[in-house]
Image: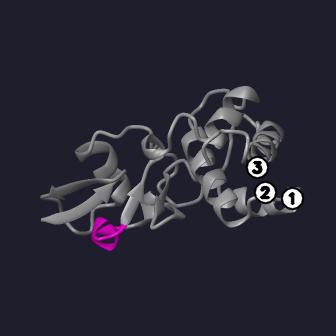
Amino acid sequence: MIDLVVNGKKYSLDVSPDTPLLWVIRDKLHLSGTKYGCGLGICGACTVHIDGIAQHSCQMQVKDAAGKEITTIEGIPEDHSVKVAWQEEDVSQCGWCQPGQIMAAVSLLKTKPQPGDSDIDSKMTGNICRCGTYQRIRRAIHKASKMTGEGVKK
């Protein structure tokens, strides 16, 4: 049995310890917001937070996530500044990469509340958008950083 805490809820799961965390999240916990993209840790569609740090869940074995706080896209409140800015900037096109993009952006703003373009480019490099919405992603991150103190959750 592997014990996990995902989005603040405790789970005890009978899974092989070497199962990728991504598949446990999607197939056992039925949290389908975290996406499978490449399976190689390159595209970022599977990004989740492990103890507050953005990580690619396709590259982490579930045993290595045991006892840590895991947050998926479902665990980010709808009124979080990043999700609000994403909507306002109409970032999503096909949407496949967007959960991972949002998770990376939330992590960036936790460590750098007022990022510059180079900070955004550096942090978001591990997340590929096949639709090419990078300019909208950057605008949304800047907008989210300005929403602090405007009554929008961070």
- Confirm or deny contact between disc 1 and disc 2 (CB under 8 A): yes
Identify residue type, mark 1.
Gly
Disc 1 secondary structure class: loop
Q: Secondary structure at mark 2?
A: helix
On the image, the x and y values in percent for residue 76 come to 50, 44
Between circles 1 and 3, the one closer to the viewer is 3
Q: Residue at x 60, y 39 (%)?
A: 98
Residue 9: image location, x then y, percent: 27, 51
Q: Residue furthest right?
A: 117
Residue 97 visible in the shown view: no
- Residue 100 placed where, x, y %? 56, 47
Bounds of the magenta segment: 61-68
Say which of 136 and 77 sits in front. Answer: 77
Indicate which disc residue 21 carries: none
Name the residue nearer the viewer: 25 or 49. Answer: 49
Q: Is residue 66 magenta?
A: yes
**Three-letter code for the amino acid on which mark 2 is drawn:** Ile
Residue 136 in the image: state x and y as whole percent.
79, 36
**Residue drawn where x is 53% and y is 34% of the image:** 78
Could you say which quadrant of the image residue 14 lies in? bottom left
* 95 relative to 22, above or below: above
Label placed on residue 145:
3
Question: Which residue carries the number 2 mark?
Answer: 120
